[in-house]
Structure formats: structure tokens, C-alpha cells
Amino acid sequence: MTGWLWVSALLALVLGVTVFAPNEWATKVRKEHPRLLVTAADFERLRLAIKTHPLLQKWHRQLRDEADRICQEPPSRYEIPDGLRLLATSRRVLRRVYTLALLYRLDGEKRYLERTWQELQAAANFPDWNPRHFLDTAEMAHAFAIGYDWLFGEWSDEQRRVLRDAMVQKGLQPALSVYREKRWWAQARHNWNQVCNGGIGMAALALLDELPELCGEILSHAVQSLQIPMREFAPDGAWGEGPGYWNYATSYNCAFLAALETAIGSDLGLSQMRGFAETGLFPLYITGPTGRTFNFADGGDGTLRATQMFWLARKFNRSVYAWYARTTASPHPLDVLWFDERGNDPQTEGLPLDKYFRYVEVVTLRTAWNDPNALFVGFKAGDNKFNHSHLDIGTFVLDALGQRWAIDLGADNYNLPGYFGRQRWTYYRLRAEGHNTLVINPSQDPDQDPTAAAKIVRFVTRPERAFAIADLTPAYARHAAKVQRGIWLDRKGNFVVVQDEVTLNQPGDIWWFMHTPAQVQLSDDGKHATLRQNGAELWAALLLPDNARFTVMDARPLPTSPAPERQNPNKGVRKLTVRLTAVTTARISVVFTPHGKQAQLPSSVAPLTAW
């Protein structure tokens, strides 16, 4: 048995994934074009559907307007503005090709075909697709795969040669070197793997019948490699890099699997890997009633525009995924192609209000699905070693009255010196002090253990209340024997409690932080705070310790912390704080309740063991 067949047999036995030997691929592929994500019959079906469905008609008009704007713009140029990334150009080419190619296939106007060629010809003439930052290469290969395949019958022999040569020389050959030399992204557990394998894999599928040896070897490598990050979806579909990188990773993961289905008739069992069918639940639960995500790790808190949710809905018969895609779409051309009108909101579909995502150790709690003013809390323990992670074990976000009160600041500028290296933990937004968690004995050092992993140790959800308790001790083991945080959401009483219980190794200082865009007014005794934004008010009370008080600070490093230049100044953000000094044990309990909502606040503070 050859090495390829041995690996294929072993993986099929263990994981249910088939990995063809390189010389098998060409015997499996459909010879007709288009064969990536769509067939000629699908385009005809889509033309008919647009005539009868109002939302598809609206999206078609929007995409047509976009295509018309593209026709007035010059082709993309080779630009690496930060000295590292061609990525913005690759993404622009990709979006333009999808839009123009779809509109040409639907409407048949030659100007869309001609403008697609101008875009692809310009990128084919680039000196390279920047393989040192291979995401750029993969996204450009994706663009060329779609342009080549969807418009195959419209291109002349010479045009096909230009596109094919560009894909081979600037995409497939550089990728083959990565695979053969076992370089890092082919072994990675995170989004780079899915994006690079997905983009390169689609180009290989587009050319498979013409270049069977090269494309077959690449596809065998890609299918093997892709299983590494797909294992990270287990057990329940969440993603350790946060919601923003979930969107990026799964968009390419799903596109490649969809292309495998249309090109060879099967995704080879990849979609059946543990947790993948549930991954559409992650954006549903991680999004609060404000429409903002719990954006832990690098990333922003904007609504996820996730066209792959349509594909996931059909693949796994999860109609609520399609509801999410419809209600958040921009739209993208794949929203039109994969459109699914099934499904209702999570409440109608019967989804529980609360969710604990294991492995990534994230919990979300809410009072309702359909109320834009509902209470919502996102809370994480997690692993500081995940790619794109911050020192944010214990952090939380809080929505109420249609506002986000406790925010995650998100990523800083990726081009800051050492952002992904030794200086990473000097930047405020990446440190614990830049999150809604605890800092113990602050100094120039990282304020949580960068190698720590913490667990949710108790999760309870009931009709009238829900809570989660996390053991944060690994993050603070240098200073503490025990650190636990519990978050309680009371649906009946309409309040949230954040409670910390800390035992230090020796007397020390503890800081409690919550970042907010709201204006904050403190009571004279410092035991209460009123937060105001956009006409809404949130009330906070410091129940314990008795001798502590709230203060308000700017979202800036503590005097004892690093203060590197050029980091984000976090204008317009302040933080509600509590400081305890020279303590050995502490219990900090803070309750939040929306102003104007009838609340039944707790009459006493129970230890976490009594929750």
C-alpha cells in the first residue's frame, strides 16, 4: 500500500474522512464548468427564484448597483501599504470577481464580463501574490478560481491560459512548496489553515482536469491539512479565536467543502467531523440583543455577516441558521446563491436562552431572544494560548435596554511593533487591565499568565435564572491560591450579579475593572453608580466589600504598567473600578439592573458555593 493510500485508509477509519491519493482526484471531478459552488442549472434556478422572491429581488438590485459602481472604478493595483500585506487588494479582487461574475451569469450584460477580465488580467500581471503573507495568495487564488470556473465558456483560449498560468505560478506552486516542506500554516490549528487550504483548494479544483498531477497532489495535502483546524470545532462548534475569526475561518472552510460537493460530488466526510454541524450556533449565541457580538480575542463587536450560515443551514437542516443569515446579510453574492427562506428566530425555533460552549469555555446568558432591550451577558474563562487570544480570562460583556454597557475593546493595530511577538502583552487592549476582569498586584509583567487555561466549573440554566462560575486561578497562580468569578443573571428579578472570590498567597492589591462607553455618575459614598448612554440608564451597586467604593478611570494603563507608543488611546471609553489594597482574601460583588425596569434585587450576598 502506498503512503497516500495508507494515510487515506487510516483517516477514513478514525475520522470518517476520505483522502484520495493524488492520482485519484482527476477520476472523480466533473469535467463541466461551472463546477465550483454552482452548476449551470443552479444559475438558471436562481434566475427564476429572483423573479418570485422579494428579498432576492432586493439583493439582486443591490448587487447590480455594486457591479455598476465597480465598472466605473479602475482595476486593482499591487499595493502593500503596511510593508507586509497585499490582503486588502486580494479581498477587493475577490469581491469584485464574485459580484461581476454572478451578475454576468444572471443578466448576461457583456460589460460585467469585460470588467471581470480587466480585474483578473491586472492581478495576473502582478509580480506575485505576496506568498510571504500567504492569506493574500489564497484569497487571490480563490478569486481566480471563481472567475476561471464561472466564466469558463466565455473566455478565449488565450484568456484561459493567462488565468491558468497565474493560478499555477503565483498560487499553486508556492502552496505546493509549503505542503512538501511542512511549513507552518499547513500544520496550524487556526484560521490561516482554513483560508489557505480553502483558497488554494478551490483553484486546484478549477484546474483539476487540466493539470491532474499538480492539482491532485495539492488537494490530497489540503484535505489532510484541513482536518487539523476542523478538530477545533469539537465538541459544540465554538471557536477559540473569537467570533470575528470564526467568521473568516468558516467562510473559507464552508466554501471549500461546498466546492468539493459540486466538483466531485462529496465533501469526503469533512463536514461530519465532530462539532461542525453545531458551529452555526456560535454566532447565534455570541450575539447580544444589541446585535453586537461578544468579541473576545482580536476582533470587533460588529454583527457577523456570515453567508456560510445559508450553506450550513442546508447542509445540516438547521433552519435557524438560515434565519440568522437572512437577518444579517449585506448581501454577498453567495447570499443570493445559497439563499434559504426557511427558519424562524431562535425563540420560535425553541433554542434555549443560555449556552455553555465547552473547550473555548464561553457562556452566554439572556433574559429573552426577541426583546431588543433584554439583559445579556457574555462571559469567558478559556485559554490564553489560543491564536489571537488576549489576557482576558474572566472578562464579560453586558447588554441591557438596547445598549452595550460593558464592552470589549477588541484588537489594536496589527502593525504595532511586536504585536504578534514579544511585545504583545505590553499593549493595553491585550492585557487583563484592558478587559472586564481582575488584575492582581499590577506591574510591568503580563497581568495574567499567558499560558493559562481556565474552566467554567459550574453552569446552571433554569427558567427564572442562570449562572456560571469560572475558576480563574490558573491565570493568577503567581499571586493567588484561589480566584473564582461567578455571573448570575436573574430573569425574574431583572438583574445581573458579577461576584469574585479571591484568596491571595500573601497580602496584595486587587483591581476590578469594567470598560464602558457610558457616562458614569457615582453616589457620594461610592457604593452606587449610574451609567447613562443614548437616553438609557443602568444602575450598579457595590454590595461587597463593605469598605470598598467605586471609582472611575480612563481606559489607560495603570502607572505600574507598560505604556508603549502608538497604541489605541481608547477615546470615549472609561472604566468603572474597584480597588482593594493589602488584602489576603476578598469577595467583590457587584449587581447591575436596568433603570426603569422593575427589579427584585438580592437581599443578601451568598458565597459562590451556595449558588
Image (cartoon, rainbow, N blue to C red):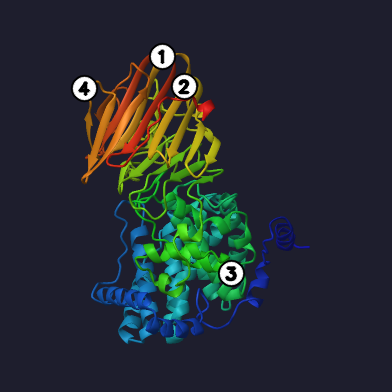
Q: If you read the primary sequence from the N terminus, does the residue marked by circle 1 or circle 3 appear first?
A: 3
Please state the horizontal and vertical placement of residue 132, each as a whole percent of the image: 43, 54
Quadrant location, the N terminus: bottom right
**Toward the viewer: 336 or 76?**
336
Left or right, residue 14 beside residue 599: right
Labelled pair 1, 3 in contact (Cβ < 8 Å): no
Looking at this view, name the residue that lies furthest to the right.
1
Please state the horizontal and vertical placement of residue 16, each as a whole percent of the image: 69, 60
Give the Cα distance between marks 2 and 3: 59 Å
Kind of residue at badge 4: Asp
Residue at 26 percent of width and 25 percent of height: 551
Kind of residue at badge 3: Leu
Give the Cα distance between marks 2 and 4: 27 Å
Q: What residue does disc 1 label?
A: 583
Give the Cα distance between marks 1 and 3: 66 Å
Residue at 53 percent of width and 34 percent of height: 453
Q: Is residue 214 above or below residue 302?
A: below
Left or right, residue 401 beside residue 524: right
Mark in the foreground, 2 or 4: 4
Q: What residue does disc 2 label?
A: 502
Q: If you read the primary sequence from the N terminus, does the residue marked by circle 4 or circle 3 appear first?
A: 3
Please state the horizontal and vertical placement of residue 83, each as a whole percent of the image: 33, 51
Which picture quadrant has residue 594? top left
Mark in the foreground, 4 or 3: 4
Q: Residues within 10 Å of mark 2 (few under 14, many from 20)?
A: many
